[in-house]
Amino acid sequence: MTREELISRLDNVQSLPTIPPIVSRLNEMVQDEDTTAARLGKVIEKDQVLTAKLLKMVNSSFYGFPQRISTINNALVLLGFNVIKTLIVTSSIFEVMQASDIRLFEHSLGCATAAGIIARRRGIKNPEEVSTAGLIHDLGKIVLRAELPKEYDRILANSRERELPVRDVELEIVGMTHSEIGGILATQWNLPDSLVIPVKYHHRPAKCKDHQEITAIIHFSDILIRAVGFGSGGDPWVPPLDHKAWDIIKFGKSDAREILEELDEKLAELANFTGEIDQEQ
């Protein structure tokens, strides 16, 4: 399959759930300066299934709020519209991932958790958005598995047999990496650049010109979660750390120790969360 053929196929993705109509309505409301979080919350809460999904996600360990969020209105105030919109768009996608590849789902949750911890430590204004970028960073793998299952299986088998990173084999077999695919789909869904760019460049943070700090954090978080072995990104290899990314987020030994201690505690909570999901299925 050529790169052009794959891009054409991505324009007509059939295997993944479509964007809920509510997102278009919410986008229109957000353009109106008079729209409040309360009004947005009322629109979302009319969909009880979506409300339940959102509240379950925002109360998960990777966002790390000390108190339970019980209403969509509170979630909007605390997380912001970009995060809630992304969760609405991707909630059905994560149902697909939970059912088909729980280990990839665990990896994504772990990356989101690590990214949030680092973002808060660095004093980033919206750490929840950074967590959300971590949550969707491997979106392209979900697309590959859903749209090109035979090729996806070949990619994983080749990666194991030849001891190569998945992204190298992706280039050989489908002509594009999962990060590029994820970036294309996130753009089609009109997600903000602060989420699209980390998805697209999380393996090549030195290549991005905007949102470099968020991208560097996602890059490092992906490596960190692979190193501690929480979930699976599809292969057992720990990618090399990009020097530019490290220059951006570099911290000392004491910071690293505290981050790892907090991460260890959060991952234990996430293990319970994913265990509950397994029992539900």
Image (cartoon, rainbow, N blue to C red):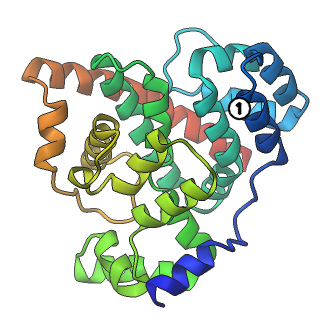
Is residue 173 depicted above or below 178 in this figure? below
Q: Name the one closer to the observer, 232 or 51.
A: 51
Can residue 148 be seen at all in this image of the molecule? no
- The single residue placed furthest to the bottom in the displayed view is 1
Q: Name the one closer to the observer, 175 or 96.
A: 175
- The single residue placed furthest to the right in the displayed view is 46
Is residue 211 depicted above or below 147 in this figure? above
Residue under the point 16% across and 50% down = 241
Q: Quadrant of residue 264?
A: top left
**Residue topped by disc 1:** 54
Disc 1 secondary structure class = helix
**Can you give x and y, in whole percent of width and height, for residue 198 in the image?**
39, 47
Residue under the point 31% across and 77% down = 160
Can residue 272 be seen at all in this image of the molecule? yes
- The single residue placed furthest to the top in the displayed view is 67
In-image side of 256 versus 184 (left or right):
left
Three-letter amino acid code at the position of disc 1 = Leu
Report crowding for label 1: few under 14, some 14 to 19, many 20 or more residues within 10 A (C-alpha): many
Q: Name the one closer to the observer, 15 or 23.
A: 23
**Can you give x and y, in whole percent of width and height, for residue 111 in the image?**
39, 41
Residue under the point 54% across and 33% down = 272
Q: Quadrant of residue 18?
A: bottom right
In-image side of 215 versus 27 (left or right):
left
**Can you give x and y, in whole percent of width and height, for residue 64 in the image?**
49, 20
Count of marks placed on residues: 1
Residue under the point 86% across and 21% down = 42
Is residue 261 depicted above or below 176 in this figure? above
**Can you give x and y, in whole percent of width and height, for residue 89 in the image?**
68, 46
